[in-house]
Amino acid sequence: MKEARISITFMLLAVTFCVCLIVSNLMEIKTVSLGPLTITAGVVVFPVSYILNDCIVEVYGFAKARLVIWLGFGMNLLVSLLLQLGLWLPGAASWEGQEAMEMIFGAVPRIFIASFIAFLCGSMVNAYVMSRMRLSSARGRGFSLRAIVSSLWGEGVDSVIFFPLAFGGILSWAEIGSLILTQTFLKTFYELLILPVTMRVVKRLRAIEGEDSPAEPKSYKWWRINEI
């Protein structure tokens, strides 16, 4: 079987993607006032994972982006499980931070599950839309449009899945609908603001890798992580 080529640059992007995803989840515990809106601190970091996702799809293709998404999912799950293990371990007599640790790292199972499902679906949809638009465009033009449209779809799917699963029956459907719209457009607007930086990163990656037109994936099935 032919070995897949994984460059150091691609590896660094994958590691950064995983770190941003894990840190954003750890920051979700804090709420931040943004004018009349109340958001979570994770909103500052989480969109970066979508930006990296766009860069990977644009330069390396959907198949490698799919691999990175599953890697991020797995590493985030591992960190969450290890944190739960840390919570379960009996504390020393001098340990006084158990309540604070449980408040920050003791995620409610319902929110925990909703977050993981939403991330996986949103990220895959983002990569799929980005890839399909990339392959249908003339010589790969129109990156800016692809980045915004794919993020809008990805963030939208993420929010549509997360908020009903996490807060259905707790918040009113009007509040859930408001959260879905607010989070989707706020995160997409974040990417719009940072788009000039994203474009420079993509241009630099193309120069480093010498790749301008990633091959069409063998399959868009989410579980085909060996097809890179």
Image (tube, rainbow, N blue to C red):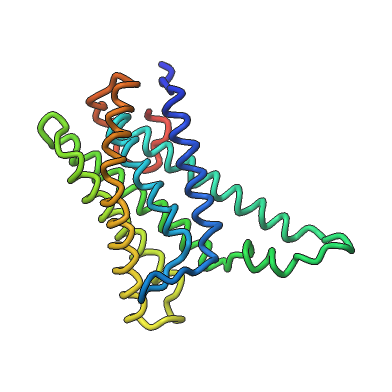
Which residue sits furthest right?
93
Place of residue 53 in the rendered image (x, y in percent of width and height, measured from the top left): 35, 42
In the displayed image of the protein, which residue is found farthest to the left? 138
Using the image, determine if residue 60 lies above or below residue 174: above
Q: Is residue 34 left or right of residue 91?
A: left
Which image quadrant for residue 69?
top left
Of 53 and 206, nearer the camera is 206
Q: Is residue 213 left or right of residue 209?
A: left
Question: Whole-percent x and y of residue 203?
Answer: 27, 29
**For this rendering, which residue is in front, 224 or 207?**
207
Say which residue appears at 87% left-offset and 60% top-offset.
92
- At which x and y percent is residue 133? 18, 41
Residue 165 image-quadrant placement: bottom left
Q: Quadrant of residue 3?
A: top left
Give the vertical position of 5 relative to 39 (above or below).
above
Residue 88, how many percent across, how many down? Answer: 75, 60
Residue 106 appears left or right of 155 = right
Q: Residue at the spot x=51%, y=56% of the render?
A: 25
